[in-house]
Image (cartoon, rainbow, N blue to C red):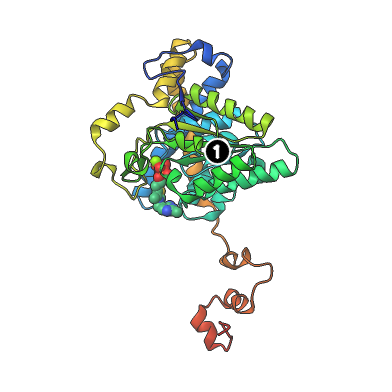
Amino acid sequence: MPRNVVHKVEIERVSILDEHGNYDAKLGDGLIGDADLVRLYEAMSSCRYLDEVAFKLQRSGRMGTYPQNMGQEAGSLGAAFILDKEDWLVTCYRENCGLFWRGVPMESILLHWMGDERGNAMPRAHFATPIAVPIGTQMLHAAGLAWASKYRGESRIACTFFGDGATSEGDFHEAANFAANLDLPVVFCCQNNFWAISTPGRIECSAPTVAQRGVAYGMPCLQVDGNDLFACVYAVKWAAQRARQECKPSFIEMVTYRLGDHTTADDARRYRDQAEVDIWKERDPLIRTRKHLEQKKLWDSSKEEAMQARVKIDVDAAVVRAEEIASPAAADLFNSMYAELPAQLAHQRDTMQTHSLASEHGVRTTGH
Ligand SMILES: Cc1ncc(C[n+]2csc(CCOP(=O)(O)OP(=O)(O)O)c2C)c(N)n1
Ligand SMILES: [Mg+2]
């Protein structure tokens, strides 16, 4: 029997504004208006400043572990900008910029990393799910949300963000399989920053592109320059259209880089070459967007100075709000898990005593 090719795969890469300032006017046509571009640049800048402040808060003992977003602002921001305000944004922990664009207050993110879960209780109006720290869970949530939307006949789609490492988790494969086979309106956005903490991409994905993992499930896939705001908007627009009109999922690989450590609990100098970091510093999404704005005469150093001053005021005020919030009532620990609180837990809540102490008071604490 002859050997025939039964399937061939090609992955396209989209780049509209590269790090040298080259701009593809044809692909970029009508994507982002001038006024919006200024606002988007300001959004990235304020997110970046928040990152710097959060790092210092952690180092001075005022915050727990914090994952800097530095370098990865464009992807989630591009998505939040182009999606409908009522599409689900289902993120992990490096999508602050998109969440802020949605209206999530900065202090919510600070509070969350200060250990106060009220920060992760996203108001329904933002159509954002809580930040997912367990790797990969949110992709399944996105598939479920999209399924619910389809079932109810709504036009709302779900856009989920996850890292390259997350595509090696079973959760990704289950979510992709589910979304593709049930025809669910999901936009899968992988922020490929080449590292899963200290594990390099080449160890966790042997294929030349992460996008191929989406192809395996029959999804159309695009790779984009994830530090190019225009390319991110372009790709999410393409995928969102397919999700809304055809009720089908797509996969976007956003190639990016985290310029900081994995989190404040990490020291990336122990496993990454400075030369690699330096290359990516040149590709910073903020720098190229600013240069582009300057070329278009929409920005200059005095605007930059005024914007930085505004950003500082906003972020500093968010820190004050996060630090000055009244502590939650201790009884809240008990109040959200059960419709009817079991007797032994009710006793613990009422006495604020532990399991063994509660036993001393004659309350049965186990069924055995
Ligand atoms: C289920 C689970 N396993 C392990 C971890 C520990 N962990 C935290 S971040 C991370 C790497 C994630 O890498 P990637 O998906 O590429 O995201 P990135 O941090 O690079 O944005 C791991 C293994 C976790 N949080 N959850
Ligand atoms: Mg990664």
Percent x, y for residue 37? 53, 20
Percent x, y for residue 305? 42, 22
- Using the image as rendered, state which of residue 157 and residue 334 is in the foreground: 157
- Using the image as rendered, state which of residue 325 and residue 351 is in the foreground: 351
Quadrant into which the N terminus falls = top left
In the rendered image, the vertical position of residue 58 relative to residue 28, given as above or below: below
User: Is 310 on the left-hand or right-hand side of 239?
Assistant: left
Quadrant into which the C terminus falls = bottom right
Residue occupying image coordinates x 51% and y 79%: 355
User: Is 347 on the left-hand or right-hand side of 228?
Assistant: right
Percent x, y for residue 47? 47, 34
Query: Mark 1 highlights which residue?
Result: 99
In the rendered image, the vertical position of residue 234 relative to residue 273, given as above or below: above
Q: Amino acid at mark 1?
A: Leu
In the rendered image, the vertical position of residue 20 relative to residue 351, given as above or below: above
Residue occupying image coordinates x 47% and y 18%: 16
Residue occupying image coordinates x 64% and y 41%: 127
Q: Secondary structure at mark 1?
A: helix
The answer to whether the beta carbon of the residue marked 1 is less than 8 Å from any atom of ligand 1 is: no
Residue occupying image coordinates x 53% and y 55%: 117
Percent x, y for residue 352? 55, 75
User: Is 158 on the left-hand or right-hand side of 310?
Assistant: right
Q: Residues within 10 Å of mark 1 (few under 14, many from 20)?
A: many
Work out whether residue 312 can be spotted. Answer: no
